Image (cartoon, rainbow, N blue to C red):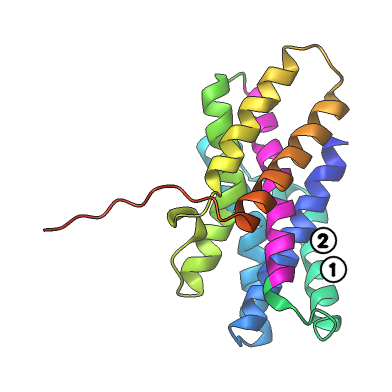
Amino acid sequence: MFQLLDFIGTFVFAVSGVLTGLNKKLDLFGVFIIAFVTALGGGTLRDVLIGRTPVGWMLDLQYVYLIVIGFVVAIVFRKKLDKLRVSMFLFDTIGLGIFTLIGLEKGIEKGLHPIVCIALGAMTATFGGVIRDILCNEIPVVFRREIYATVCILGGVLFFVLQNCNVSNDFIYLTTTVFMIVLRLLAVKYKWYLPTLYYKG
C-alpha cells in the first residue's frame, strides 16, 4: 500500500505540474521541468534534510518513468481536460494527501519525533508546489490564505492518533489520505481561510 501510494503521488503531482506548465504556455521542455520539480521537489528536500543520499529518485528510476508517463498522458489528453483549473486542483489535492504520508513514514523510519515527522510530511507534500509556483512566477499556494499546509499538519496528527489505536497500517494510510483530500476540498468549497495579517507601516 505504501509503495503504491508513493507511485500514485508521484504520478498525480507530475500531471499537476504538466497542467500548470501548459496553463503558463511553456514549451515542452519547460513543461517537463515543471512536472519534474512538482513531483520530486519536496521529497528531494526531505531526503537531503534527513541525510538520505543519494535521494530516492536517483536510486529508483521508476519515479522518473512515472513522471515521463504523467507528462505524456497529460499532453495527449490535454484537450479533454477542458476545465484546466479544476483538473490542476484535483490532482494537486490528491498528491497533497499522499505525499504527506510519504514524508511521515520517512521520518518514522529515521526514528524522529512525531512533530518532526509531521513537519517532514508537510514539507514533502508542499515544497514541490512551492518550487513549481516560484518557477511559474506565482506566489506559492502554501504562503497564501488557503488551507493547504494546515491540511498536512492535521492529517499528520490524525495519523499518529490512529497509530495509537492499534489499527492496521493500510487503514491508517487510507483514512488519513481520504481525510486530507476531503478537508482540502471542503476548505475550497466553503471558502475556509486562515486569517491574513496586515502591517500598516
Residue type at the position of mark 1: Ile
Q: Quadrant of residue 34?
A: bottom right
Using the image, determine if residue 75 lies above or below residue 36: below
For this view, does 198 lie left or right of residue 185? left
Q: Is residue 95 magenta?
A: yes
Residue 97: % across, % down? 70, 45
The residue carrying mark 1 is 69
Which residue in the protein does label 2 denote?
A: 66
Q: Are marks 2 and 1 in contact (CB under 8 Å)?
A: yes
Q: Position of residue 3 (x, y in %)?
A: 84, 40
Q: Amino acid at mark 2?
A: Leu
Left or right for 177, reference 196: right
* Vertical side of 21 occupied by 188: above or below: above
Residue neighbourhood size for the residue with mark 2, other residues' Cα within 10 Å, grouped as few (<14), some (14–19), many (≥20):
many
Q: Residue 178 versus residue 64: which sits nearer the camera? A: 178
Magenta stretch holds residue 72: no
Q: How many marks?
A: 2
Give the extent of the magenta segment.
86-110
Q: Quadrant of residue 176?
A: top right
Give the Cα distance between marks 2 and 1: 5 Å
Residue sitting nearer the eye, 197 or 43? 197
x, y (%) of residue 81?
Answer: 80, 79
Name above or below for residue 130 compared with residue 171.
below
**Helix, strand or loop at mark 1:** helix
Q: Secondary structure at mark 2?
A: helix
The reply, left or right, for residue 4 in relation to residue 194 is: right
